[in-house]
Image: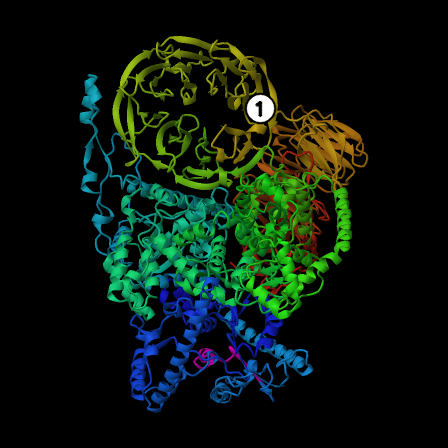
Amino acid sequence: MAMDRIMSGCMDSVPESCVSTIRVFFSSTFTDMTDERNLLMKEAVPELRQYCHKKGFDFEVVDMRWGIREDAASDHSTVDIVLKEIENCQAVSAGTNFVLFVGDKYGSRTLPNAIPVTEFRLFRRIASWLGLKFEMVEKWYLLDTNTVPHVYRMLPITTLLPFYGNLNPVNQGMQKVHQQNWECDERSMRNVLRKVATVALQQNKITEQESSKYFISVTENEIQKGIYTYSQVQNHVIYFERTLININLQDKMAKRYTDLTKNGDLDEEVQELREKMKNQLLPGHIPSDQTVHNVVSWTPKGIDPKFDEHGRYLTMFCEAFKALMQKQIDLGIKKVNESKIKNHIMSESVAHLRFAKLKCMCFFGQEQLLRDICKAMENGFVPRPKLEKKDDEVSPIENTKEEGQNDNGFNASNEESNAIDEKDGNLIENDANENDSSNGNTENKSDNQEETTERLSPENVAETNAHESDNEMNEEDEELERLLKDKMNELEKMRQMYSNMTNGPTFASGDMSNETGTDPSRSMREELTYFKRTRRTRRPVVVYGPSGCGKTSLLAKLGYMVKTWTPNAVLVIRFLGTTSGTVNVRPMLISVIESIWAAYKVNRPMDLDFNSDMIYLGQYLQALIWQVSTPERPLYIFLDSLDQLSPNEQGYSLAWLPTILPQDCALVLSTLPDTTNCLDSARRLLRSDKLFIQVTPLTVEAADKIISAQCNSRGREVTRPQRNFLLDRFRECPTPLYLQLTLNQALQWRSHQQVKDLILGSDVQHAINHLFMKTERNHGIVLVSKAFGYLAAMRQGISTLEMEDLLSLDNEALQDTFIFHLPPDPEHIRIPNSLWSQIMADVKDVLASEMVSGRSLQRWYHRYIAEVAEERYLTDETRVPLHRLVAQYFMGYWHGKNKPLSLFKGKIGWYPENTRNVPDQPLEMQDGSLNERKLKELPYHLAMAGMWREFHEHITTNIDWLVSKAKAFGVSDLKTDFMLMLYQRDRLSEEMVKDKEDKPIALEEELEGNKEKGGKKNSKDKEKAKSKSKEKDKAEEEDNQNGNTNQNEDLLQMYNHIDSDLFITESTIVQDMNKGKELAEDGDNENIEAEREGEEELEGEEKAEPDYVLTLATALRDLEILVDIVTLGVECIRQSPNNLPVQITCQLGKSRALTPGLKKLVADCYEWMENTQIPLMVPQDACMPLPGEMLQTTLSADVYLSGADRMHDYPVKLSMVDNYLYVMEQTPRKFDILRVLDLNQGGEYVMVDDTRCHVHSLRFNENEKFVILRVYEKPDAYQASFYCRLYERNRLAPYTLDKRAKHMDVSKTGDLVAYADDHICFICSPQPESLSLHIIYRLHHQEVICNILFSPDAYYLLTFIPGDEFKVWVPRRGKSTLTIEGTNKDKYSSRSAQPDCLHCITANHRLLQVLSSYKECHMIRVYNLSSGEIIHTLSSPELNYGISMLEVDEGEEFALAATTDTGIVNGNTAKSALLWDLESGNVASRITSSRPFTVIKILVQSKTIFVLAAQWRDSVITVYNLGTIHRPVPGAKIVRQIHGHSGSILQMEIAVNPNPDAGGDRLISVASDNTIRVWDFKQVLTPASKAKTVDLGAVISFIYTKDADAIFLATDKGVILRQCVETGEKTTVTDDLGCAPHKIMLSKNGRLLIVAVKNIIYVFYVETGELEYKLESCTNSNISCLAESGNVLVAGHSGMEGKGRIWDLSNGNIVRDVSFLYGFYTTAVNPSGTQFGVTMFEYPIMVDVFSSNDEGPNISMEQVDSMMAASTHLSFSPDSSMLVSTSGDGRIRIVDIETGRYLHTMIQSSSISCLTFSWDSKHLLTGGYRSIYIWNVGTSDEDLPPEARGQLEVKLTRHTNFVSCLQLVLEDRFLITASVDKSIALWSMKTRTVLSVFRYHCAIYRMQAAPNLSTITFVPERSSSAAVLTLNKAALQALSGVSTVPVPAKVKKAQAVALSFSSQQVTTKTSTACIIL
């Protein structure tokens, strides 16, 4: 129930945050417990820290012996600091929080910092009555009414005694005077207050507790806070009591262990207080099992560790401490784990609800803004757009009559929801421009006066035709229902037909009628994103305003109000950037989706892929919203701070945003207006000003209420003058952030402070800086600068322990800390734990905490504060050192290492061998979790620090890192890390590289830095130090006086040579300085010898690897190659990060890695894959394109739909402005979708537009401002008609037109748009605000306009008329300058549809026009548009098939023409492409071809003419060189051929010299295989290198030998190769086949290799490779099918008269020829070789091989299925009892061999792509779309019950496209499948689950596994070798049935659950499969 309330967004049910820290306060008197506390800090604390670290917790100790600055004593805040630390420990510690050590000393007793006002006045009266002087108390204690209740607070000492803490030697005398004065005043006040308090207590005027504060010590104050008043002492407190017996008060050390008077006697008063505390109070508050008592004998040295008894005591003490601590830690961690929210989505929701609740606490004002947002949510309805209006249409303006309020709290107001403003609904007359009348065009004027059109307001222009939209949606629903019904009826008819047959076959369907997952005509993506839209919809609302204006609090308050209005509503609120799950858009969307699932109890769809693109996730979210939201339970989604999203994965484009919402849902967003383009993106998507709410400034009245509320909540007040001062400053900067910053300062003011003494920043930035300066004054500028610098440098925030570790590693921070005292433990030096806590306490109001990776991280809660902090503390000087130290920390460099420290600012000390006790930073923690902090932070800091060597070592070439990063944060974050380093390329200068070349990371740098700060000592200083080192006391004095001196160079040498541990203190430092020189001199010889050894080792290393010196260029090149690898394999890696090492080896292999770094990476990848516990298929060598080569990336897009009734002409267009690729995708039974991909981000989707039409082509205008879509009016491949749509490109915003545009063009600058209907051409001016076109002129024509075209400078506009006639207009004046009459007046002799591309206007106003008549379609006329004269007529008989493509180079010197006609007339096959010189009109060059071209592109590079061409049905792009522009060559020369696509080329786009950030020159190719490939254009034009070896061609087919030790390969060059599986070596079997073989197989006995080439069959011996037979088939046509078994070979030729020939391979003789009508599309031979199967009229029949009777067994015509399709496969069962035939319509027919009777008929939704029998013939496996079907086909009575035969046993679904290959191996225990979805899967047939998946980058059509599964082979892309995969250890163990990972018992019992993933279907009750659906 609590979870339901949380998931519904109820803020009242938010639990407290879980802690992951054990923070312990050590309380004791300092001097007597020094040995015990030092021992614990040295031995127990590091061990406990490691103990907690293993459990995922941080262990922190607060030791107040050191860490409180001297300034704290001046303002009397010491006790307050201590008590706050105790309170903090109690709040954050999961276990022990207070450890008390009590000895024989009571401790110091200080005056209270504040006295209640009533108590103070009482004391004043009593003092007067007693005759005591109270003036001193009144002098130091002043009334503070700002504290509630009011108090008298003690003034800081420096207020009255300014030199008290002054360390300036000049003021040393005054300092001593003021210190003495304070001691005197303090003593006087202490005496008075204690006397008065005693009398007041005796008179019962005050309580004993109130009196005690004047007497008790600081230690007992701590005890009161940590024990007496603490309610959870049980298991949170530990008490150690130590009693020293027989203390000799005469001993010098006695005063350190007990309380003595000045005379050396025991202080009886203190003794009494201590005994009362020890014997009465503490025993009653602490359980005995948490108490340890020790009695120890006294020695003259007090506690002496060298004394045996004391040594034993200390050991036992330490062990007892660790035992008790571990016990309480375990209990605390157990309690935390029990209460921890293990559901990650619930944990995420709780974090955001907690943040929202915090923001709501002090929300005042802005009520009007809340009302505006609510109104905007109500007014979100906007109808669907209508982009153009037909002549006979009237724009509907309808007002809905619904009134009142829905149950969900939305007001359904007609006026606000549906009605269009009266002003907007008026009919607007589109009169012509004044120029029309001036031109005398009365006809136009008349038309303008008569014509009117209706136009919507700018707010509603995007959506205008709701009825049309709803009708379209309803038609789609009806179509789907009709298809589903037809499918069900068809299945029912088949069942009925077979049931009526006598002894007929069984019938089974493998798919349910309503199942979509296995129907290739239905897209699962579309099914999941589909929703049934209603007329009334809502739109998102966007709240925007500057930083600090209160947007976050506004949304939090709105969320709270929503739950108040409608308690049943579901609120999903996310404050983006506040948690790790809301930084990137993908996890944020997943978080929102999962929250909705949890709130509405929705199960996750099986086919939903969270690794898909962002737009898909957004579309699914939109469909989910429509699915779940109801009036009874509406849904509210609030997303705050869109600008905080990472720009990765197109977060700022908002293409993922649901924009159409149901009535019962509201979506509210907030963003900054200018920092990112989020607001612009939102305006592009929503296009209605009513949906955008700007945050108004906070009113003064609201600010006053906030001040009062904050004062009440914190128990503070401000005086009226102070409040007025605060409000006056607020008026100057009226933002909530400024008010909060200044109010936090004001709440610390005292009432006696005058306004003139108060300082507030004038704006937000000054207020933040003022806060920082105040913190620096309180804690020291160096320490604060370092702490805030590290906080600002962090990528994600910082934990308390991390901050303490970093400050401990920072020598400057330590230098500033240890000024007045030296470190207590010289071997382990760390910053005092309390320092960072004290700093955090001062800025707690501007810090925010979030749980990341189980740890609480602090960060600036507002981005503005973070920016100011970065500007202040991350300067050019400090940025790199800070990032470097953080990088070293997360590298774990200083773990267990010495880091020298030299102290010189105050106390002097030299610590050459001390560690800082910082933890190790492994990638994987001991509990198996990843070190997400290291994964997130390390690459960022390495890049920011310019540590490219370390980046190369720890990131680029570290496969463990790469995989861990991809697992933890995804491949997008991984690429971001890479780019961070690449972006530093320019900053990494050669000087920087040289300086760092041979240095350790930072050791020498820091030592040198210390030397420079301390200054170099001259020889005189050395002699002075040496002379004074003789006496200890003098040495101490000298050290103190020379506090600002550093160690000399001898000291550095001492560090290099010293062997023993040193305990260096203030008293011994000078002696060690003297010894240093002697040690250095003694070690000279050793040093020389060590140097020689080092040189010898270095020489050895150089000999081993002399050529390898890592340079910056090499490191960055390795990184670039890695980026290319990840980019090419991004889809595979997204599916599983474990695919990353597989992708690296696929692309680099063992031979392609050229640098040592990449070689190491590849070797580590192989080692990783072999040793991982994840079953993997490992590539033996490279099998993918080489990264960094010509192919840059491959994208998948449905640009070609097989069997569609229309085609895309130009489905792709590249924008060179922003490197966006616009792709038009086709979808089955749906309209086309326009998608925009960002090539800079690897093809991530930026925008998407559901065009709701069928698109023919898309193009841009010259400056890429507009997109013009050419749309089918009626999809028809033969008689198509089109119209045009206009979009603003950067927003994909559609323009509304007054007429349907049959033709359209836009000027280069985009200022003019011309479009035409049948007879009128409209010249318009675009109106971007209203997304409409303002008509300037109407150009009337008598004939139908067939095309319009602007000249490049828009000076001319041409309108074309059938018959090659055209008119030339001056569009800016609406005048016609000339008309060119066409020569072709017979419309029947013209081509019906002439493409727009056959008209071209050059910059010098020349028109190139391809003539349209059939007789002249090979001619191009070149006109001068100024005069109308014909300059040239370009014609050639080589183009008699007509010109279909016309291209002009950029310089407009040449024109290239080609044909796409596929026919052949009179044997003429000449279809060359011709290049004309436009200046001379002569043919300059030609590309000779006998096949038509589908795509041609011409360009000139470096004065060389290049043509890129693709021919009909060809997947190869050929690059031609046609010579230079001055000397073209007559015949084109081939530069290179580009292979890669598996389908014919549809389009090419060339991007030459694009935007520098766009990735360089590129070629983009689009093919019918639905892939888009991006190529490096420079390499495309580079001639292919002449390889030293012969080009053997690319493998097209292969077959294993019988022993699977080798593979025979067939290439497209007609070469047969033999490849050794183990070594990969290849030998040539034959290379003289002449052309590519189309069939290759191995005889069943494994002795012969059979290869079919055209109509010839070559038979080779497998062992020798010698040719045994060359068999010629019975006809000259190509062999269509081939089968062999029992030494019988059958080859067939399909056709109306299918013919075949049978050979006996034992002697090569022909057995006989056979013939069957419509047969031999496929064939099969039974295992014994006595029968073969063939189809006749698609009926499967069996024929005896050696019998002359071709009729075969009789087939009962009653059993024949009349509804048959072409047979695709034939196969005999292994026992020769059955013949199976499959067809393209998904039907399976199984025939009994003996009787010829149909045994079974089965059907599946898709066509059958492959099949195989099990070895026992009991099961038939068929492959189809996404699934593998396993059918029961056993014929024996004892196999299966009769009703189960011929039925589906199980369906396995894992693939996402057609299964291309399947094979059973290892006695049918395992199944191998390959798919067009680019994957190979290994299945266990026992559990029916996938064991391992290998993912490739393109479709896999041919795959085969060795029978023993030792290797798996498939045909790679364009390679002369087969790709061979092997199984790693984990996969081999999985084959053996041994689990590599322990499986819990519950999981073992629930193995059937895994089958649910297969979406299996159970058809009978007796099926052996588990019924789990």
Q: Is residue 1137 left or right of residue 641?
A: right
Give the residue pinned by disc 1. Answer: 1519
Q: Secondary structure at mark 1?
A: strand
**Quadrant in which the N terminus appears:** bottom left
Instruction: Tell which residue pokes out farthest to the bottom in this image.
Output: 202
Q: Is residue 865 magenta?
A: no
Read off the magenta span. 220-242
Residue 578 pos. (x, y %): 43, 56
Residue 1809 shows in this picture: no
Q: Amino acid at mark 1?
A: Val
Q: Position of residue 292 (x, y in %)?
A: 58, 83
Examine the rendered structure and indicate whether residue 640 appears above or below residue 308. Answer: above
Q: In front here: 1501 or 903?
A: 903
Disc 1 residue crowd, few under 14, some 14–19, many 20+, Cα 10 Å: many
- Name the residue: 50% across, 45% down: 519
| Foreground of the two, 1954 or 1921 | 1921
Residue 316's quadrant in the figure? bottom right
Against 679, is 1937 above or below? below
Q: Nearer the viewer, residue 193 or 1648?
A: 193
Q: How is the image coloured?
A: rainbow
